[in-house]
Amino acid sequence: MDIPAMRANFAKAAATGDEAPLYFYSHLFLSHPETRQLFPVSMAHQRDRLFAALGDVVARVDDLEALVPILQQLGRDHRKFGTLAAHYPAVGGSLLATLEHFDDQWSPELAKDWTEAYTLVAEVMIEAADAAQEQPAWWEADVVGHERRTIDVAVLQVRPRTRYDYTPGQSVSLETDLRPKLWRYFSPANAPRPDGLLEIHVKARDGGPVSSALVRRVGVGDVLRLGPPLGHLALDAASDRDLLLVAGGMGLAPLKAMIDQVARTGPARRVDLFVGFRTEDQIYDRADLQRLEQDNPWLTVTYAVSDDKSSALEQGDVGDVVLRHGPWLSREVCVAGPAVMVEDTVSRLVQHGVPPQRMSSEVFAPSRPGPSVDGEVTE
Amino acid sequence: MTTDQNESEHGERGLSPADLQNVRFTRASMLRPGYVDTEVDRVLSRVAEELGRLYAEKAALRDQVRSLQAQVEGVVIPEAPSEQAVRILSSAQQTADNYVAEAEEFSRQVTSEARATYEEEVRQARENAGAIIQAAQEAAAKMSGGAPVGSDTGQRTVEEMEEQVAYLKAFGQATRTQLRSYLESLLDAIESEWGRADPAALPPEAMRPPAQRAASGTTTFVGNTAGDISADEADDGLPAGAGSRSRSRSRSKSST
């Protein structure tokens, strides 16, 4: 394979911006109309993602050790979209047609190299998808509880119809029939329970089709689809250090799941949870956190508000409030929330002297359409 | 008779043209010129056998070809789409994408403006209530502190003041509830509009015209005692939309 030539060829297509992916999908849908139903109505985000993913693959094509796990993850994750082995040749054909269309110097050698490379990629993805065959491509789950906590936050109780395994801190991708083919990631706010219930916290983002529908239209009796769990936020299984958990806004969910984990399975340890919101009214889960605090003497919950002068709670950014309560040098730390809050809190704690390897964090972005090719859950 | 192959192998391998060319019959005795009859007979019978086998195989192959042809005829081999078709579909897709993006943007704007208005009204209502309560408490303290000094507050009793404080607290609560239900009906209407852009995605009952929802929402709102207050404040509340932008910046910063 002449990798430099392939990269040069790919760069020509990528340089056209939206045009090449637009050509690719139109070519695919015209030559294999049955593939259209695998995609949402609006293809705008899809197009960005396709070429970003292809670019990642092309960049690593000479580093199979790094590439193969990424492709395996992609292959497994594509099962929930309804992707079948038969779709891969269709995609390969349209990909080649696209690469040819945007290159005046297309040659039989390039065609041969790309065919070889694509066949390899497809084989790895199909193999990984087949290897995951014993677990379902997606899980149907009934909404058994739907509670509006504030003007734009709802807490859903969801019961998968078949066994659904995950670890506290992981994220679950989720689709509703109201917004077909749009998958978004949410973190369950509880550890796995004997009754299988998942508690899902959703904030309706302004103009966000999925989150708004989950908050304002979905109700008890509706069915959601869940994809396989994903994500890297997790408690260190080998450690029983005391915990410091810092949540900004909806970042509360995975941290609450960790508290639930400590309560259910231990090991016994002190847990300090700091929850930051803009105003006191927005603390949507206060009653439940108070109940947890009463039931578990090892848990302390502190609230911080950053923009609510009339509140009697602690004032300031949550990272600032955390430091006022230190020292935290011996703790294992988890931080989850919006990008700015996570960055701010992590850098404050590093300055404070907490070793970075004892800290894990996850950014909760307004739209979390799916994992990147690196396996990151967030954008 | 000699051939290239061993006799025993012939039956399994079949008879090739080369086998026939290489057959050498043994000359018979001087008394009876020509080949040995038995050898010739044996070769002939093998040739006949082989021909029969080939005919049968040919027939089977012909059947196979026919059934494959029938299959192929049913399948339309996808032809590479023409450049023109790709262009047309591409521009149709872009048009659809733009409509969806516009709908989302519209929904985003209306929702965030509605929320900003809601927050602003709640804030003002709270401030007003707080100011009135404070004034009432000051007046009450003055009266209970000694003989009425000012003639303008003198007519009010402490009970009246406390009553008013309680009323204002309840009033503030009612205003918030009203605003929230009004805002929710508005957001609900936006959601149905979103759904109308993709009717297949909605259950039939949700297809009510949004006007009805908005109307019912407004009715409860106006029918309530708090209606006139928020109408008064609407003048102050609307320009607050401009201020809302700076607030939404701080919101995104602070995470919620």
Image (tube, coloured by chain):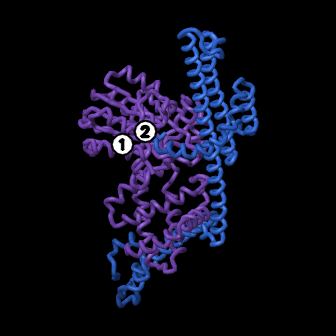
**Which chain wears blue?**
B
**Which residue has dot 1 on it?**
A345
Using the rendered image of the protein, determine whether residue A25 is visible from the camera's viewpoint: yes
The image shows residue B249, relative to residue A98, as above or below, that is: above
Of residues B128 and B31, the one drawn nearer to the viewer in this rendering: B128
Disc assigned to residue A176: none
**Which chain wears purple?**
A
Q: Quadrant of residue B148?
A: top right
Q: Are marks 1 and 2 in contact (CB under 8 Å)?
A: yes
User: Subunit of mark 2?
Assistant: A
Of residues B255 and A194, the one drawn nearer to the viewer in this rendering: B255
* Distance between the alpha carbons at the discs numbered 1 and 2: 10 Å
**Residue A130 at x, y percent in the picture:** 42, 51
Of residues B20 and A350, the one drawn nearer to the viewer in this rendering: A350
Do pointers 1 and 2 mark residues of a single chain? Answer: yes
**Residue A117 at x, y percent in the picture:** 41, 67
Residue at x 38% of width, y 85% of height: B22
**Label 2 residue SS:** strand
In the rendered structure, which amino acid carries the disc numbered 1?
Thr
**Label 1 residue SS:** helix
| Quadrant housing the N terminus of chain B | bottom left
Disc assigned to residue A248: 2
Using the rendered image of the protein, determine whether residue A137 is visible from the camera's viewpoint: no
Q: Is residue B107 left or right of residue A103?
A: right
**Residue B121 at x, y percent in the picture:** 62, 33
